[in-house]
């Protein structure tokens, strides 16, 4: 399996009374009251350092993502981050996983096709092209996408991007949401007809069906841990089977918050404040920002009204030990973490594990220690999983032949 | 009183199914509902139906059983032309009276501006469609549970508010009612997101119909000052403020609003 480092690039020093001052981590916090540009410059640099550190520690891929107008993570343009990572990892067998630029809110979406093609060229064909539909607040409030159009725009844009990457002739695009008279993209990606495509989703809805239908990789980006993911992943594999797809685990990527230390007790102790910061401050988003009318298509809306398990989780009431017990955050010694991960990755049939080894207010030194320990004592045990049985068709061709050896972390 | 007659009509190259509730006797009156669907307005429509034949269509996508109808539209022009097609099908020829609330008020005003000869009289109840930077219209699609009631109603605990937010105890019916409530906002929101200004200000001078503007004096979605903004742009328009009413005065003060509208229409 492939083990990758995921980063959100959050604001790491929010005031203690943040939740009293604001009603949400998204949209409402006022920049000049809360944030500091100098400090944020340090965060961006620290984020890049941490991701590049993971590359040296033997991880297989580095993941960036796009969010707007929030304290939770604000790589407003993930291609800017990705280009630094692509250049910085040349010569290494590392996938650059853009997870990624949001198509519905980018007009014209060929802009993303160009940026991704640039990244594929700069990295020598190591790009994985991720296409999220975008969080409701990102797409509809920060970027003015009409809620009920979000998914339709996404599908049309993806079709346009793939055609723009691979078309041999100049073409015109006369879509419902986008019109371009002459498309002749420069540059084109090295990986033809297109780099591997990954599409995130939080549950099994029309997006998952669409992903399976097109034979792309589905990324279940949940913050509720492998322990709570069986319902979604079981449904995903049923869906794949019902559409005649094989059970290749690389069809599925999964995100997990992880904290490793020398002992279980130490891990529980040192990661506690950062886990609480993540769930109390960064995931502090009221439902009305997540449930903007139209962002869910009608059948998904009906399904959500019938049963919305997440509505029952009250983050603010959960202490670190609850977050551990419930499996939202996986912490422990390398042995504890690898045993749990091995069990869950097999159970869920995950081919790409996206580790969130930086979360909340974690300082860079602790994040790097987490990366080092994980890279040295956990990752090598997970890497061989599935390799004998399945080919990873959702990984850059040039990185498939030889699995990168887990190198000793550079302190 | 017997319930309204339901007509289901397929339109727009067969891609949209629209339910129209037809009630009452008398000259034709088209009622266009707001972002929360047609259902909350039924009792008010009944009052108008005493002296008029009221045609109350559901906006595209909000007709039960046809949620995807909304995707047959691209833009504002599509919606206006679609309504022309619907009124042709309903055989509403000649100047017709239009009453519209909120989003429906904007549609009615726009129809009166783009096709002045087809609108006889126009009554707008807390319409959206104009914009002042110093008085931004509150986004009714992004309201917390605690904000929603006081944003929509002058008396958040009053009977009208209770009724508006009431859900059936049967779980299936409850899901249906809530889904309709959310999806109606999604479908109407399609045409006015993210700022409910589709350029009516450039066309509003074309409205030739005698116009009544009704406004809840405690409207916290679109401030009562907007009544003046509409009135000064429509020749001869008259404003009537409704006391103790928010954005849905036809629900909070149905008798007063119905009387104002019916007096204006000449009954």
Image (cartoon, rainbow, N blue to C red):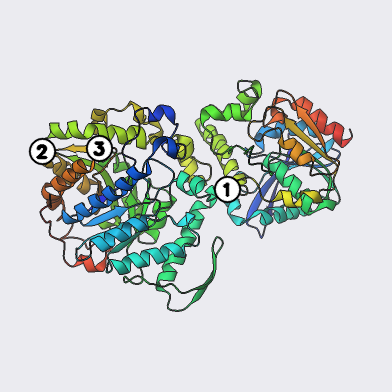
Judging depth in this view, the residue of B216 and A226 nearest the camera is: B216
The residue at which mark 2 appears reads as A262
Q: CA distance from mark 2 to mark 1?
A: 55 Å
The residues tagged by marks 1 and 3 sit, at their Cα atoms, a distance apart of 39 Å
Crowding at mark 3 (Cα within 10 Å: few <14, some 14-19, many 20+): many
**Does residue B50 appear in this view?**
no
- Label for residue B59? none
Rendered residue at 89%/32% (across/down) = B267
Q: Earlier in the sequence, mark 3 or mark 2?
A: 2
Q: Quadrant of the N terminus of chain A?
A: bottom left
Q: Give the mark toward the camera: 1 or 3.
A: 3
Left or right placement of residue A68 versus residue B199 in this view: left
Residue at which label 1 appears: B67
Q: Secondary structure at mark 3?
A: strand
Verify CB contact (< 8 Å) between mark 2 and mark 1. Answer: no
Q: Determine the chain carrying the residue at label 1.
A: B
Q: Position of residue B98 (x, y in %)?
A: 79, 43
Furthest residue in direction bottom, as rendered: A169
Q: Locate residue B175, reporting x and y percent.
A: 52, 35
Decide: few, some or many residues near mark 1? Use Cα within 10 Å; few <14, some 14-19, many ≥20: many
Disc 2 vs disc 1: which is toward the camera? 2
State whether discs 2 and 1 lie on one chain: no
The x and y percentages for residue A251 are 29, 57
The residue under label 3 is A329
Residue in the foreground of this view, choosing between A123 and A298 = A123
Q: Secondary structure at mark 2?
A: loop
Q: Are marks 3 and 2 in contact (CB under 8 Å)?
A: no
Q: Does residue A14 appear to the left or right of B2 in the view shown?
A: left
């Amino acid at each position: 399996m492939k083990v990758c480092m995921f980063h959100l690039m959050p604001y790491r020093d929010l005031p203690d009374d943040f939740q009293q001052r604001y009603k949400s981590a998204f949209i409402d916090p006022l920049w000049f009251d809360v944030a500091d540009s100098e400090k944020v410059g340090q965060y961006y640099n620290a984020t890049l350092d941490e991701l590049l550190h993971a590359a040296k520690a033997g991880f297989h891929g580095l993941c960036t993502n796009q969010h707007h107008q929030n304290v939770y993570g604000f790589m407003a343009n993930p291609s800017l981050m990705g280009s630094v990572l692509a250049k910085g990892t040349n010569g290494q067998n590392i996938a650059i996983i853009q997870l990624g630029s949001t198509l519905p809110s980018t007009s014209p979406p060929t802009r993303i096709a160009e940026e991704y093609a640039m990244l594929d060229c700069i990295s020598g064909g190591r790009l994985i092209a991720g296409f999220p539909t975008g969080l409701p607040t990102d797409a509809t409030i920060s970027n003015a996408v009409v809620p009920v159009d979000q998914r339709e725009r996404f599908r049309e844009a993806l079709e346009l991007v793939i055609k723009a990457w691979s078309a041999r002739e100049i073409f015109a695009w006369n879509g419902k949401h986008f019109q371009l008279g002459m498309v002749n993209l420069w540059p084109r990606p090295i990986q033809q007809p297109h780099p591997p495509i990954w599409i995130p989703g939080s549950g099994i809805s029309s997006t998952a069906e669409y992903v399976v239908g097109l034979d792309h990789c589905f990324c279940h980006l949940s913050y509720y841990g492998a322990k709570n993911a069986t319902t979604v992943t079981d449904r995903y594999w049923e869906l794949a089977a019902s559409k005649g797809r094989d059970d290749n685990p690389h069809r599925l990527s999964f995100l997990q918050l992880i904290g490793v230390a020398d002992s279980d007790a130490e891990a529980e102790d040192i990661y506690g404040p950062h886990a609480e910061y993540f769930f109390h401050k960064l995931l502090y988003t009221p439902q009305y920002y997540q449930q903007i009318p139209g962002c869910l298509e009608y059948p998904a809306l009906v399904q959500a009204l019938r049963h919305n398990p997440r509505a029952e989780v009250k983050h603010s009431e959960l202490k670190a030990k609850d977050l551990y017990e419930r499996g939202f955050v996986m912490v422990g010694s390398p042995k504890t973490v690898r045993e749990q991960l091995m069990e869950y990755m097999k159970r869920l049939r995950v081919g790409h594990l996206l580790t969130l080894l930086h979360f909340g207010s974690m300082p860079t030194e602790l994040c790097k220690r987490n990366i080092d320990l994980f890279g040295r004592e956990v990752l090598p045990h997970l890497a061989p999983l599935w390799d004998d049985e399945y080919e990873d068709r959702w990984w850059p061709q040039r990185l498939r032949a030889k699995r990168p050896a887990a190198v000793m972390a550079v302190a | 009183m017997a319930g309204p007659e339901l007509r289901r009509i397929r339109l727009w190259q067969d891609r949209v199914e629209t339910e129209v509730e037809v009630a009452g006797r008398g000259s034709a009156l088209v009622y266009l509902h707001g972002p929360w669907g047609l259902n909350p307005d039924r009792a008010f429509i009944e009052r108008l139906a005493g002296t008029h034949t009221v045609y109350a269509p559901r906006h595209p996508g909000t007709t039960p059983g046809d949620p995807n109808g909304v995707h047959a539209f691209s833009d504002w022009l599509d919606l206006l032309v679609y309504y022309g097609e619907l009124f042709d099908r309903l055989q509403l020829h000649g100047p017709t009276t239009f009453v519209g609330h909120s989003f429906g008020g904007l549609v009615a005003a726009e129809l009166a501006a783009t096709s002045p000869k087809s609108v006889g009289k126009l009554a707008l109840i807390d319409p959206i469609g104009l914009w002042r930077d110093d008085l931004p219209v509150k986004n009714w699609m992004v309201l917390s549970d605690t904000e929603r009631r006081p944003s929509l109603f002058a008396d958040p605990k009053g009977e009208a508010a209770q009724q508006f937010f009431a859900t059936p105890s049967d779980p299936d019916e409850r899901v249906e009612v809530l889904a309709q409530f959310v999806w109606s906002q999604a479908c109407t929101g399609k045409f006015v997101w993210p700022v409910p200004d589709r350029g009516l200000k450039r066309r509003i001078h074309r409205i030739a119909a005698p116009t009544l503007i009704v406004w809840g004096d405690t409207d916290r979605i679109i401030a009562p000052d907007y009544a003046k903004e509409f009135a000064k742009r429509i020749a001869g328009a008259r404003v009537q403020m409704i006391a103790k009413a928010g954005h849905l005065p036809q629900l909070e003060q149905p008798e007063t609003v119905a009387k104002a509208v019916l007096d204006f229409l000449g009954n």
